[in-house]
Image (cartoon, rainbow, N blue to C red):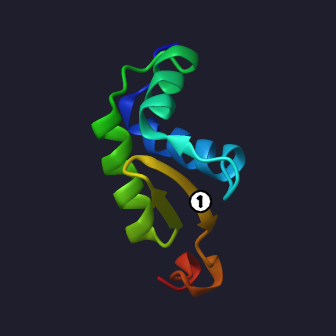
Amino acid sequence: MIKHKKLIILYVYDALKYGSSENNLLHQTKIAQQISKVCKIPCERKTVARNIKYLCEYGCEIITIKGKSCYMKSYPNFEKLVNIKNI
């Protein structure tokens, strides 16, 4: 099965949510390498950086330290998001 490049943002989210902490920073290059290797989707550091920006716009609090190392401090509050049932 061929995985689509649009899934990269979900892999970045999972990597930060489950694999990072204030004491365990992840480097954007390492995230890109893991996505390429494990998920079999070509991924570059710039792609990871762009998706981190999108996740921040979505409501994730992602802290970047020393340039390109980062961790996810908090996740979106889904109660504040639009209730799809009411649309």
Residue 6 pos. (x, y %): 38, 38
Mark 1: few/some/many CA within 10 Å (<14, 14-19, 20+): many
Q: Residue at x 58, y 79 (%)?
A: 85
Q: Residue at x 38, y 41 (%)?
A: 48
Q: Residue at x 58, y 18 (%)?
A: 38
Foreground residue among 5 and 20: 20
Q: Which amino acid, mark 1?
A: Met
* Residue 75 location, quadrant: bottom right
Determine whether 31 is above or below 59 in the image.
Answer: above
Residue 10 pos. (x, y %): 52, 44
Determine whether 6 is above or below 78 in the image.
Answer: above
* Residue, far front: 66
User: How many circles with numbers are drawn on the protein?
Assistant: 1
Residue 46 pos. (x, y %): 28, 38
- Taking the image as shown, residue 77 lies to the left or right of residue 57, namely right
Instruction: Kindly state the secondary structure of the residue where label 1 is placed.
Output: strand
Disc 1: which residue: 72
Q: Residue at x 71, y 47 (%)?
A: 18
Foreground residue among 73 and 82: 73
